[in-house]
Image: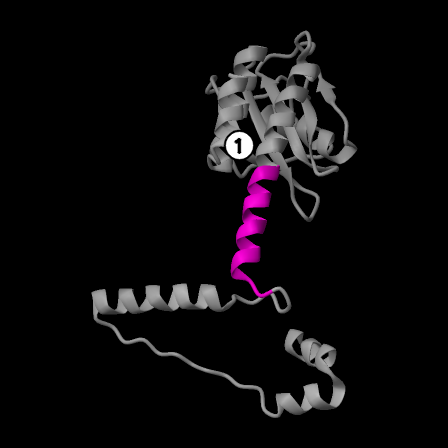
């Protein structure tokens, strides 16, 4: 269980698979009907990005948006603390997913609430014994996987992007161009290359200095 998740993270397994494993383990150790990981969007919404369910009565799917006012998972994100709901309102949005009760804990990455890990049962009732503690441990593993994925993406970005403008650098240009030439030769279509130049750019550096020239390039 936990060892397999740790090994998946260490081996650089895809984040979607890591989150699926975390949700699957939550269902196993808490004997619940479904578990999920939700991410906090820029607009404040909570969106499911990973899940596992063993009861088809649970009708949640990856990409589902959660209601902040009711869902334990969305509330854990908004409030930054564990939330337990022993019984969802029969006419509420959470009940529409097939949830009867739920528990959720925040997933914190680099000191900020990234999202939340939640579990759900189709029947109402109190949280299983130790649910918050166990979910907290799994949330730490989810955060480790998310942080690892972010670091990998950032490292890749630093390798292929110019540090000043953020545009792709010569290394990425050459790799992309080689790939385009290869595709063109294979499929028999032409390749066009446009080259742009900034008029009188040297005079900007000579007159105002290189920092000013850098500012012009960024703009």
Q: How is the image coloured?
A: one colour
Number of numbered discs: 1
Residue receiving disc 1: 50
Vertical position of residue 95 compared to residue 148: above or below: above
Disc 1 residue crowd, few under 14, some 14–19, many 20+, Cα 10 Å:
many
Q: Is residue 23 left or right of residue 66?
A: left
Q: Quadrant of residue 90?
A: top right
Q: Nearer the viewer, residue 33 or 219?
A: 219
The quarter in which the C terminus is drawn is bottom right
Tell me the SS state at disc 1: strand
Q: Nearer the viewer, residue 184 or 34?
A: 184
Question: Percent x, y for residue 130?
Answer: 69, 10
Q: Is residue 114 left or right of residue 196?
A: right
Vertical position of residue 202 compared to residue 20: above or below: below
Q: Quadrant of residue 213?
A: bottom right
Q: Nearer the viewer, residue 120 or 42?
A: 42
Q: Is residue 6 left or right of residue 76?
A: left
Q: Main secondary structure of the magenta part?
A: helix
Write down the region rendered in magenta: 147-162
Question: Percent x, y for residue 196?
Answer: 50, 83
Question: Is residue 43 at least partly visible in the picture?
Answer: yes
- Residue 12 covered by magenta stretch: no
Q: Nearer the viewer, residue 100 or 17?
A: 17
Question: Percent x, y for residue 131?
Answer: 67, 13
Question: Percent x, y for residue 164?
Answer: 64, 68
Question: Is residue 71 at least partly visible in the picture?
Answer: no
Q: Which residue lies at the image location 75% right of the left edge and 35% below the top edge?
A: 78
Q: Which residue lies at the image location 77% right of the left edge and 31% below the top edge?
A: 80
């Amino acid at each position: 269980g936990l060892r397999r998740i740790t090994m998946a993270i260490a081996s650089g397994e895809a984040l979607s698979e890591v989150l699926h494993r975390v949700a699957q383990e939550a269902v196993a150790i808490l004997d619940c009907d479904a578990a999920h990981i939700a991410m906090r969007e820029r607009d404040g919404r909570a969106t499911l990005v990973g899940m596992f369910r063993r009861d088809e009565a649970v009708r949640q799917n990856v990409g589902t948006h959660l209601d902040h006012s009711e869902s334990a998972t969305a509330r854990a994100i908004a409030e930054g603390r564990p939330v337990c709901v022993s019984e969802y309102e029969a006419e509420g949005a959470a009940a529409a997913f097939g949830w009867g009760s739920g528990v959720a804990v925040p997933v914190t990455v680099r000191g900020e609430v990234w999202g939340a890990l939640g579990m759900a049962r189709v029947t109402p009732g109190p949280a299983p014994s130790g649910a918050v503690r166990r979910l907290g441990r799994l949330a730490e593993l989810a955060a480790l996987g998310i942080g690892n994925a972010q670091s990998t993406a950032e490292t890749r970005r630093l390798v292929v992007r110019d540090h000043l403008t953020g545009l792709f650098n010569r290394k990425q240009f050459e790799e992309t161009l080689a790939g385009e030439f290869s595709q063109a030769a294979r499929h028999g279509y032409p390749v066009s290359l446009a080259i742009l130049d900034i008029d009188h750019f040297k005079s900007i550096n000579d007159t105002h200095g290189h920092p000013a020239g850098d500012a012009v390039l960024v703009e």
